[in-house]
Image (tube, helix red, strand yellow):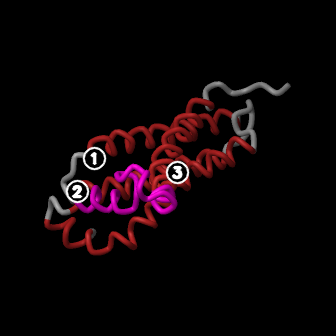
Amino acid sequence: MKKLYLYIIPVQLFLAAYWLKNGFLDKLVGIFLGIIHPKTAYYGLTWNGWHDHIVGHWDNSRIGHLFFTPFFNILFPIIIILQCLPFLLIIISIINKESLINKHRPWLIRATISSFVVTTIMLFSETLSNTKDAEYLLHLFSINMILIIYIHFIEKIIEK
């Protein structure tokens, strides 16, 4: 049996759990439940619920209201796709057994970079709109930077 590299598994678990919840469950499942069962679905996770929440935040500033609010129906599906991407890449990383010792991790680094890009885009819009969500996104931004450096460090160890 090949040995697991225990220093990489927490990275995979963190990214998988975070983007499973924030990409698939909150967005895709919530929106589809709102379409299939509009009367029983939790309103906050339906398309209209997300619209009210996000546009409500964007409308707190003139910049958000001017540049983001009119384009919600275009921007939100893009964000949903981008938020699902890190989770899909982590699944590919797990399938390719990138948690084993002496195994290169191209899918894990792609997942981490995609997580960083999504977080940066969300942080940009939230900061311009002066919303409270910018604080937790800044923390996630920092974690993503650390994870990218950490994975590159682990890859350098493998090369030696």
User: From the viewer's perspective, is 4 left or right of 85?
Assistant: right
Return the residue at label 2: 57
Alpha carbons under labels 3 and 1: distance apart: 19 Å
Q: Earlier in the sequence, mark 2 or mark 1?
A: 2
Q: What residue range appears in magenta?
A: 31-56
Residue 68: x %, y % from top left: 27, 69
Return the residue at label 1: 133
Can residue 151 be found in the magenta stretch?
A: no
Instruction: Tell me the crowding category of disc 2: few under 14, some 14 to 19, or many 20 or more residues within 10 angstroms, Cα based.
Output: many
Q: Is residue 59 visible?
A: yes
| Image quadrant where residue 93 sits | top right
Task: Specify the quadrant that holds the C terminus.
Answer: top right
Give the vertical position of 7 relative to 44 (above or below): above
Task: Specify the quadrant that holds the N terminus.
Answer: top right
Please name the residue shown 53% across and 45% down the image: 20
Q: Is residue 114 visible?
A: no
Instruction: Tell me the crowding category of disc 3: few under 14, some 14 to 19, or many 20 or more residues within 10 angstroms, Cα based.
Output: many
Between disc 2 and disc 1, the foreground one is: 2
Disc 2 residue type? Answer: His
Residue 119: x %, y % from top left: 40, 51
User: From the viewer's perspective, is 85 left or right of 53?
Assistant: right
Q: Earlier in the sequence, mark 3 or mark 2?
A: 3
Alpha carbons under labels 3 and 2: distance apart: 22 Å
Nearer to me, 125 or 20: 20
Nearer to me, 44 or 63: 44
Residue 157: x %, y % from top left: 65, 33
Can residue 34 be found in the magenta stretch?
A: yes
Helix, strand or loop status at disc 1: helix
Say which mark, if any, is on residue 147.
none
Give the vertical position of 9 relative to 93 (above or below): above
Nearer to me, 93 or 5: 93
Say which mark, if any, is on residue 24.
3
